[in-house]
Amino acid sequence: MPSLFDPIQLGAIHAPNRVLMAPLTRGRSTRDHVAQPLMGDYYAQRAGAGLIISEATGISRQGLGWPFAPGLWTDEQTEAWKPVVAQVHAAGGRIVAQLWHMGRIVHSSLGGAQPVSSSATTAPGQAHTYDGKQDYEEARPLALEEFPGLLDDYERATRNAIAAGFDGVQIHAANGYLIDQFLRDNSNFRDDRYGGDPENRVRLLREVTERVAGIAGADRTGVRLSPNGNSQGAKDSNPEAVFVPAAKMLSEIGIAFLELREPGPDGTFGRSDQPKLSPEIRQAFSGPLVLNSDYLGGDAQAALDSGVADAISFGRTFLANPDLPVRLQKGAPLNPDNMATWYSQGPEGYTDYPALEDVAAE
């Protein structure tokens, strides 16, 4: 079995190791969702990852509801990403853009209108806004005539990601956001071709993936799913019935890799009593399978040894340890992350986490 430090081919992307950087919202863009130069420093520090999956990046104003998160729907946003991506490449890294539509998680103060979703539902909890926490609002169902425009938004963002120099894209279809709201039966109550049985609920994911892969190439297109548990109020009563066919469909399209966020019952950032579906999805998906959520060193290697995972993506550990692959290979101590600075602006808790070489020089 391969080790975490062996190379892997992710479609057209050659990854020198299997320690991937998971997508992490960090809130360092402008209010107009334009990437900032500091982001180049942050990602370049982590260029030792086998592959960096960027923070979730909005495909449209309608779909982006997080303060200071980046977008990829305007020329200004695209141009601002270019030096960030170039800095990663200059440091020897590879990076794909995660494409994001938040659906009902968007607050109207950011999206500019009532949020949209699969059905007229309201997410539990409160939204992050520029005016502090505010209750989520009821979403309106997307009308059938709006789907072509939604697919156009994904296409435009994909074209902009490629123009910015990204090595590919990942479709965010997890964590209770728009596509996930279509997949789950407690958030999708439609009675048209996008609702009802699992085949219909998977339809939007298939259409988006086909459109994105048609622009970036299937071998430069990844997808993220979160098949088990409750994600921001989105949950399915029979996840195997929808997510295993979804994985089979993605395998047939030939995507570069599939990433699964699977919290366990003792998860540190989200928990689930629903069992992990990665073993079943492994049987349905023939491409590289990336597992995520609470992995450290030994358990990550064990997931590879089991044959279920081909690579592991690390989130908060990569946030706090810019040289994570080196630390894991050496068995070195890990820096703890500071939750108070996850979404703050500026370098604190962003580009000031020390690497091993910095610690040794002190």
Image (cartoon, rainbow, N blue to C red):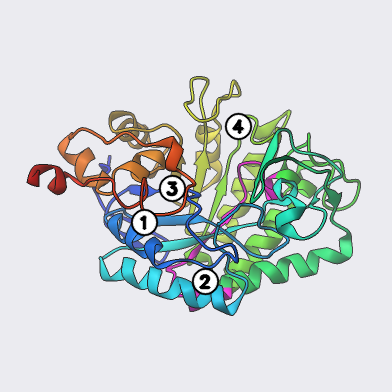
Residue of label 1: 51
Measure the alpha-carbon separation of dots 2 and 1.
Answer: 16 Å
Does 289 appear above or below 73?
above
**Disc number lying in front (4 or 3):** 3
Region rendered in magenta: 159-180
Secondary element type, mark 4:
loop
Measure the alpha-carbon separation of dots 4 and 1.
Answer: 24 Å
Which labelled disc corresponds to residue 22? 3
Measure the alpha-carbon separation of dots 4 and 3.
Answer: 18 Å
Which labelled disc corresponds to residue 161? 2
Which labelled disc corresponds to residue 228? 4
Secondary element type, mark 2:
helix
Secondary element type, mark 1:
loop
Q: What residue type is labelled 1?
A: Leu
Q: What residue type is labelled 2?
A: Ala
Measure the alpha-carbon separation of dots 3 and 1.
Answer: 9 Å
**Disc number lying in front (4 or 2):** 2
Q: Which amino acid does label 3 sit on?
A: Ala
Measure the alpha-carbon separation of dots 3 and 2.
Answer: 18 Å
Q: Earlier in the sequence, mark 4 or mark 2?
A: 2
Res. 99 image quadrant: bottom right
The x and y percentages for residue 267 are 49, 25
